[in-house]
Image: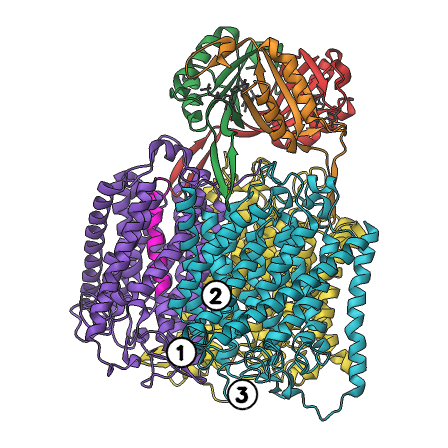
Chain colours: A red, B yellow, C cyan, D purple, E orange, F green
C-alpha cells in the first residue's frame, strides 16, 4: 500500500474528490493547511502596517491506496487539480507499512 | 486599479458638482422673504396644527434614527456577512460601512433635496442642497428650527438619511462575492440619485403623485415605512444586478454554504430590533400610531418566523435556524408598507403570508429561473415588499388609518393605487438599474477578475483577511 | 420525524382552539356598554389621575420594549450560544428566535388576556383574546386608545410580550444540547400558558392575590420587574427540566468547555444594556422612578461583576471573563424585583450578595447535587431571583417606594409577603413543569436520540452547521 | 499571584477609605438647611428657568445612557478585541467588562462627587460621596428629585458614569496584549480618581476654570461631549502607557495582524450607534441642540469613513474595511468636542480632516517614532481629540452655540482657550499617568512575564480560552 | 520506529489519549481533519439549497513509537476508538527514518 | 527524497520559515495541530468547572527535501526552533517514494 499526500488548491477539492470516487477510490482524509512555495504570496495591510503573507491556504488530501491503484490515483489528481498556474501543488507518495480498519480489525488493503 | 480609482473619484466629483451648480443658480433667485421655517412639511398623520417641538417626539425620533442606522451595521453587515463564504466576509462588511459614509454625505449634499424639495409631483429640486433651510439656528438659548410637524426638520432629514443608507445596502445581497468595489461605489451613488430619490419623492414628498396625504396625487398609495420606496426598489434592482452580473464562478457546482450562520442570526435579530425604529419611527411621533406600528411590526416578524419554519418543517423535514431568521425578515419587509394601515392581528396574517411567499421565492422560484441572487435580496425584499404593498391595499382599515381603507372594507380603488405604485417603482428601478449598469460595464467593468473572485474579495479588493486564527 | 411534527402542530392547533372557544363564549355575553377604554389599568406607581397619553412616556416605553426584545436575541442567543459546544450553537439560537415568533403570537392571541384579563385574584380570563379591547382606534386624525396610565394599553401589552418571550428562553439554558426541538416548542407553549400567565396574573394584574398595588391582595409582594414572575419561575422550572431530562452524554467525563466565550461576553453586555429597558421600563413612564430603577440596575450589575470576579480571584486564583459576565447577570437578576424599592447604594449591596450567592450555586451547589443544568439557568436565575425577592423584603425603603417598606425599616410583614410570593411561584413552577414534562415524555419524548446528541443538535434537529470555515 | 491580589485589594480598600473619611468630616459640618434640590446644576444650554422634570428629556437621556454603556461593551470590547491576536481576545473583553463594574461603583462612591461637587475651580469635593444629595426621594406617589435642568440629577449622574467607564477603557488599547490584569485594575482606579475627575471638573462643573458656561472661568473652552475630558485625556495617557510599558515581544519582527476583523467592524458600528447617545445625549435634553449634535455626529463619522478610505486607496492601492472603520471612529472622536458648536456641514469638514490626520498618525507617525500603541488608542483618540478640540475653536459658530464663536467668525480668543484646555489636559494626563505607572511599576509590576505573554493573557491572566472549536 | 496515523471519531479523542497514556505512550500530535469514506455523510439545507456533506469531522492522531510498542499502541487505539459502526476510522503505520528532539538534539527512540 | 515533519512552537514559525528559505529550502506545508507530551498542559476554569488541557497548540511543518539537503534542513530547524524549554517539539523523518509537481507533472527532486 501507498499513501498519497496531495497538496491542492482550495477550490479544487470537490472536483478531485468526485474524480477519485469515479476512479473507484472511496476513502480519503482532508486537512486544511497553509503552503509556502514558488507561488507568490500576497500583501495585507492593517492600519498601514504591511504584512507579506507567504503561507497560502491549501488543502492536503491523504489517500491510502493499494499499490496497483497508485498510478491511477496520481493521474486522476493531476488531471483534475491542474490549472497550469504556479501553486497547483504537489503529490508525495509514501510506503505504508500497515493499515487497519478500527471497526473490524481487518488489515492490509481490505482495510481501505 | 488606479484607472478605476480615478474613474470613481471623477464620478463622485461630477455628482458633487451637479447640485452645487443647482445651488448657485438657486441662490440667485432666492428672496429673503422665504422664511426657512416653512419648508418641507413632512408626513405626519397626526401632527397638531401648531408646529411646536415636542420633546417626547424628538426623543423617540432620535432613538428611531439610531436604530435604523444599526440595521445597516451591525445588522445587515452580519446578516449578509454570515451568508457569504469566509473569503468574502469583509467585502460585505466594507460595502455596508462604506455606504454608511458615502450615502450619508450624498444625502446631506443633494439627496435630501432631490427627494423632498420642491412641489413637482415627479421630481425634487435643489432648494435644500447642503441642507439649506433644514438646520436649526440658535440665538442666545432660543432655537429657531424649521419644523416637520413636532420635530425639527433636521431630525426628519437624518431619519430619512438612514433609509438612504440601508436601501442600497440591501442590493448588495444580489451581487455579493463578485462585484468590483470601485464600481459598486459609483453604482450606488448613481442609483441613489436617479432611482431612490425620485421614488421617495413620488411617495413621500407632499407633492408626490403617489403620496398618500397629497390631495392632488394621481394615485395616492399607502406606503407607511417604505414597501415601495425601500424594499421593492432595492429588491427589483437586486434582481437586475444578479442577472446582469451573472452567476458566481462555480455556482451550482461547488457548494457555497453560509460560512457563519451565527452571524446571520445576530444580524437578523438586530434587524428585527432596528425595524422598530424603521416602522414605528415612520409615525414621526411617539403617539398611538407609532404604538400600533410597533406592535404590528413585531407580530408580523413573529408570524414570519412561524410560517417559514413550519413550511420548511413540512416540506423539507426540518425547521432551520436560517429559515426562522429569513422568515422574520420576510415578515418585517411585508409589514413595512402596511404598519400604518393594518391592526396587529391583521399583521399576523401578513407575516404568515410573507413567510411562505418568500420561502417559495428563495427556493423554488430561484431554482426554476436559475439566476444567482447570492443572498436572496430579491427573494426577500422584492417579493416581500410587493406582497406587502398589495396586501396593504387589501387590508387597510379605517380603524387604523383614520380615513383611507382597502379592498376588504370595500375600496378596490386603493388596491389599484397600490398596484400602480408598485408598477411605477418596478419600472423605474428596472430601467434605472439597467442603464446605470450598462454604462458602468462599458466604462469601469462590473465584476472582479476570475482570479480575484477565486482568491476572494477580501484579499483582492481590500487586502485583508477576516479571520486569522492560525 | 413527521409524527412528532404532526403531534407538535396538533398541540399548537389545540392551544389556538382553546381561547377561540373562550372568545366565542365571551362575545355572546358581551354588552356594548363596556367601553374599551376602561380595561387593564396597568401598574403605574406615579400615573396621574387623567389617563392622557404622554409622548415622553411612550417614547421611553417603545425604546424599552425594543431593548427587552434585544435581550432574547441577540442577547441571550449569544450569551447561551457561546457556552455550548460548537455543534449545538445553532440549536440554542434557533430556540431563541423561534420563541420570539411563537410566544409573541401566543401572547397576542391568548396569553395577554390570561395574564391581565378579568378581576379574579388567581387567574385571568378571555376578555382580551386576539387583543380585543387593547388596540387603539383612529378616527380622522384622532385616536381613541385604551390607556394604561399615560401610555396606550397596546404599548403596555407589547412590553409585557417581551417578558413572555425571554422567560421561557431563559429555561433553555437548562436543557441545552439535548432536548428535542419539537418537544421544546410544545413545552414552552404549555408552560407559558399554564405557568407563566397565572404567576404574572397573581403578581402584576390589578386583582392578583400577590399584587403590590391591589388593596385586597392577600400577600402584596414587591416585584418591580419580575424577580418572581420571570426569574424564579424560569429558574426553578429550569432545575426541574435538568433533573427530568437527565445529564448530557459524557457529562462529567468529557470536557464540555464553552466553545466561544467572546459570544458570551457580547451576549452578557447586551443583556446588561437591555436590562435597562426591562427594569427602568417597568416604571411604565420616563419619570424619577424609572431613573432610580435605571441607576440601581446598573450599579447592581457592576457590583455583581466585582463580587463574582473577586470571589473567583480569591478562591480559584484567577478572575475569569466568564465569571465577570456571570456576575453582571447575577446582579441584574437580583435587582430585578427590587429596582422599584431600593436606592442605588443598596443596589450595590444586592449586587455584591448576588454575585457571591450565584457563584456558590453554579460551582459548589451544582457539583454537590450533581444535576446537569447545562448553562446554569437555575444557578443564576433561580438563585439570583430568590435572593433578590427576599432581599427586596429586607431593604425596601419608603424613600423609594413612597409607601411600602421592608424589614430594615421595621416591617417584617413585607418579608413574609415576599416569602409567600416566592413559595407560591416555586410551587406552581415545579408542579406545572413536572406535569407538562411527564405528559410530553410519554407522548413526544423529551430528548434527542444518542446518535443525534453526539452529532449535535445543529445537524440532527436543523440540518445546518454554525461555522463552515473550511 | 496572591501577593498582587492582596496589593490590589488593599489599593481598592485604601481608595474606598479616602472618601469615607471625607464623608464623615463632611457630615459633621453639614447643616440641615441645605436643601438637596439645589445641588449640581448641570450643563444645559437651553434648560428652562423652572427645574421641572420633562419626560421627553428623561426618555432621551435614559436611552442615551444605555447607548453609551453599549459603547464600552459590546462596542469597544469587539472593536479592540478583534484587533488583538486570538490568544488575548478575552483579556481585552475582561478589561472592558471589569471596568464597567469597578468604575461604576467608584463613580457612585466618590468619583461623581470629585468631578461635580463643590465650587472650587480646580477640584471637586466630597459633598456627593455615596450619591449623597443626588438621588430622588419618593413620598406617596410624589417624588422630590434633585434636578439638573429638566432631568433628575441621578440621570445626569448615571449618564456621566458611562463616560467614567469608557474613558479608561479606551486606554486599554495602548497596553493590550501585555499588561498585568491586577495592575491594570489599580491603575484605572487611580487614573480615574486623580486624572479624569479633575479634568472633568475643570471643563464640565459649573465652577471649573475651563468651563464654557462659567462666567468666572479663566479660559472657557468649548467641549460639548468630551474632546478634552474623554479623548485627549485617554489618548495621551495611552501614549505614556505604550512608552512606559515598552513594546510587545516580537513587535516589528513577528506579524501581529488583527485576529478577527469582523468583530472590529461590528464594534465600530456599535460605537457609531452608541456615539449618538454620547454626543446628542450631551445636550441633556431632546431639543434642537440634540438634533444638531446628532446630525453633526453622524456626518462627521461618514466623512471620516470617506477620507480614511480614500487616503488609503490613493496611497496604499486599496481601501480597507479596517480603514473605513477607523475613519468612522476618527470622525466621531473629532466631532465630540464640536457637536454643540458647529453645524452638520462643517461637521463633514471636521470628519474629513480627522480621517486623514488619524490615518497619518496611525501609520507614518507611529512607525517614525517606533512606539507600540497596540491598538492606536493615541493615534485615534489622542490625535483625533486634539484636532477636534482645536477645530472647535476655529469653526464654532454663533448660529449653533447661540453665543460663543470661533476663529472663522473673528474670535481668535476662543482658539486660545481651546489650546489652553488641550494643554492643561495633556499636562495633567502625562504627569498623572507617569506618576501612577512608576509607583505601580515599583510595587506590583506592570507587565506579565515573558512566558505569560507568549502563552497569551487569556490563559495566563484568566485561565480561559476564547474559541474552542476543536 | 514507526509512526501511527489513526483517524478516529471526534468524541473518542480523550478516551484514546487516556488509554495510550496508561499504556505508557505519552506523546502524540492531533489534527482536526475531515474524512470521506463508507460512512454516509449528511444533508444540509440552506434556504432550500441542499448540500450533501460527504466530509465528516474526524480526528487524526499521529504517534511515533518504538517498534516494540507498535502492537500495543495499535491494539489500544482499536480497543478504545471502536464503536462498531461504520466510520470508526483507520490506522495507518509508516516507517520512521529518524526522530530528533529539538530541545536536546537527542535522536532515535530516546527522542520520543 | 525525505519528508521532514517538524512539530514546533507556534510563535517560531516565521523564524523557522525564514531560516529554511535562507538555507535554500523554499517549499513547505504547515498545519495547525495540538500536541501532547512532556510539556505540562494548563488548567482552565469555566464557572468553577476545571479542565486540564493537555493538548497544546503547536505547528507542524512538512518539508520534502532531496536527501542531500536533509541534514541542513534538520539543523536549521533545530537551531531556530530551540528555546531549551520542554515542549520545543520533535522532528520526524520519512522516506518519500515519489514526488510529483501537479502543474507540470515533473517527478522526483525536480518537482520540489
Ligand atoms: N518541499 C516541499 N515540501 C512540502 N510541501 C511543499 C514543498 N514545496 C511546495 N510544497 C507545497 O506545495 C504548494 C505549491 O507549491 P508551489 O511551489 O507554490 O507551486 P507549484 O506546485 O506549482 O510548484 C505549496 O504551497 C506547499 O504547500
Ligand atoms: N483510503 C483512505 N485513505 C485515507 N483515509 C481514509 C481512507 N479510507 C478511509 N479513510 C478515513 O477513515 C475514515 C473512516 O472511514 P469509513 O470508510 O467511513 O469507515 P470505516 O473506517 O468504518 O471503514 C474516513 O472518514 C476517512 O477519514
Ligand atoms: N511520540 C510522539 N509522536 C508524535 N508526536 C509527538 C510525540 N511526542 C511528542 N510529540 C509532539 O511533540 C510536542 C513536544 O513534545 P514534548 O514531550 O512536550 O516536549 P519536548 O519536545 O521538549 O520533549 C508534543 O506537543 C507533540 O505534539
Q: Nearer the viewer, residue C408 or B215?
A: C408
| Mark closer to the observer (3, 2) | 2
In the rendered image, residue D266, in percent from the top left (x then y), is placed at: 49, 52
Q: Nearer the viewer, residue A1 or D28?
A: D28
Which stretch is magenta? D161-180
> On residue B208, which mark appears?
none
Can I make out residue C428 in this image?
Answer: yes
Dot 2 crowding, Cα within 10 Å, few <14, some 14–19, many 20+: many
Q: CA distance from mark 2 to mark 1?
A: 17 Å
The C terminus of chain F, quarter of image: top right
Task: Determine whether the beta carbon of the residue marked 3 sits less than 8 angstroms from the nearest atom of ligand 2.
Answer: no
Query: Label 1's element?
Result: helix
How many numbered marks appear? 3
Residue to which mark 3 is pinned = C52
Q: Is residue B105 above or below residue E53?
A: below
In the rendered image, residue D46, in percent from the top left (x then y), is placed at: 33, 79
Amino acid at each position: 500500500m501507498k499513501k498519497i499526500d496531495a497538496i491542492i488548491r482550495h477550490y479544487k477539492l470537490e472536483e478531485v474528490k468526485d474524480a477519485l470516487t469515479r476512479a473507484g477510490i472511496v476513502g480519503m482524509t482532508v486537512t486544511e493547511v497553509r503552503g509556502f512555495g514558488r507561488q507568490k504570496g500576497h500583501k495585507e495591510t492593517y492600519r498601514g502596517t504591511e504584512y507579506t503573507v507567504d503561507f497560502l491556504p491549501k488543502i492536503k488530501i491523504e489517500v491510502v491506496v493499494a499499490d496497483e491503484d497508485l498510478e491511477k490515483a496520481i493521474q486522476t489528481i493531476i488531471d483534475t487539480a491542474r490549472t497550469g498556474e504556479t501553486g497547483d501543488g504537489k503529490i508525495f507518495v509514501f510506503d505504508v507499512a500497515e493499515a487497519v480498519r478500527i471497526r473490524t480489525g481487518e488489515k492490509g488493503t481490505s482495510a481501505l | 486599479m488606479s484607472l478605476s480609482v480615478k474613474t470613481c473619484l471623477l464620478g463622485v466629483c461630477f455628482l458633487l458638482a451637479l447640485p452645487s451648480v443647482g445651488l448657485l443658480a438657486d441662490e440667485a433667485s432666492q428672496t429673503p422673504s422665504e422664511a426657512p421655517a416653512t419648508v418641507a412639511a413632512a408626513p405626519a398623520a397626526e401632527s397638531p396644527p401648531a408646529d411646536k417641538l415636542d420633546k417626547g417626539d424628538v426623543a423617540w425620533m432620535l432613538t428611531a434614527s439610531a436604530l435604523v442606522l444599526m440595521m445597516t451595521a451591525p445588522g445587515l453587515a452580519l446578516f449578509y456577512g454570515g451568508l457569504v463564504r469566509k473569503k468574502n466576509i469583509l467585502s460585505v462588511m466594507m460595502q455596508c460601512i462604506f455606504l454608511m459614509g458615502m450615502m450619508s454625505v450624498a444625502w446631506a449634499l443633494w439627496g435630501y433635496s432631490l427627494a423632498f424639495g420642491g412641489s413637482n409631483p415627479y421630481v425634487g429640486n435643489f432648494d435644500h442642497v447642503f441642507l439649506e433651510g433644514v438646520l436649526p439656528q440658535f440665538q442666545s438659548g432660543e432655537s429657531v428650527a424649521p419644523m416637520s410637524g413636532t420635530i425639527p426638520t433636521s431630525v426628519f432629514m437624518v431619519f430619512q438619511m438612514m433609509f438612504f443608507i440601508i436601501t442600497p445596502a440591501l442590493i448588495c445581497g444580489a451581487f455579493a462575492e463578485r462585484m468590483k468595489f470601485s464600481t459598486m461605489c459609483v453604482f450606488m451613488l448613481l442609483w441613489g440619485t436617479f432611482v431612490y430619490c425620485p421614488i421617495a419623492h413620488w411617495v413621500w414628498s407632499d407633492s408626490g403623485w403617489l403620496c398618500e396625504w397629497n390631495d392632488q396625487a394621481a394615485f395616492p398609495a399607502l406606503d407607511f415605512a417604505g414597501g415601495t420606496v425601500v424594499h421593492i426598489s432595492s429588491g427589483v434592482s437586486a434582481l437586475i444586478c444578479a442577472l446582469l452580473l451573472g452567476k458566481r464562478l462555480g455556482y451550482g457546482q461547488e457548494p457555497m454554504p453560509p460560512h457563519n450562520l451565527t452571524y446571520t442570526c445576530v444580524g437578523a435579530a438586530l434587524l428585527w430590533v432596528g425595524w422598530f425604529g424603521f416602522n414605528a419611527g415612520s409615525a414621526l411621533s411617539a403617539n398611538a400610531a407609532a404604538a400600533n406600528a410597533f406592535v404590528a411590526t413585531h407580530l408580523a416578524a413573529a408570524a414570519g418566523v412561524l410560517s417559514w419554519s413550519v413550511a420548511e418543517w413540512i416540506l423539507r423535514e426540518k425547521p432551520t435556524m436560517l429559515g426562522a431568521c429569513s422568515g422574520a425578515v420576510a415578515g418585517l419587509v411585508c409589514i413595512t408598507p402596511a404598519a400604518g394601515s393594518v391592526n396587529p392581528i391583521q399583521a399576523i396574517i401578513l407575516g404568515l403570508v410573507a413567510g411562505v411567499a418568500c420561502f417559495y421565492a428563495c427556493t423554488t422560484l430561484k431554482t426554476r429561473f436559475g439566476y444567482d441572487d447570492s443572498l436572496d435580496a430579491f427573494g426577500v425584499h422584492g417579493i416581500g415588499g410587493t406582497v406587502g404593498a398589495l396586501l396593504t391595499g387589501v387590508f387597510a382599515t379605517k380603524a387604523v388609518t383614520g380615513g383611507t381603507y382597502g379592498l376588504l372594507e370595500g375600496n378596490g380603488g386603493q388596491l389599484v393605487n397600490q398596484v400602480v405604485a408598485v408598477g411605477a417603482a418596478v419600472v423605474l428601478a428596472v430601467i434605472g438599474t439597467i442603464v446605470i449598469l450598462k454604462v458602468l460595464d462599458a466604462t469601469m467593468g462590473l465584476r472582479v477578475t476570475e482570479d480575484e473572485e477565486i482568491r476572494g474579495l477580501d484579499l483582492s479588493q481590500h487586502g485583508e483577511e477576516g479571520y486569522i486564527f492560525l
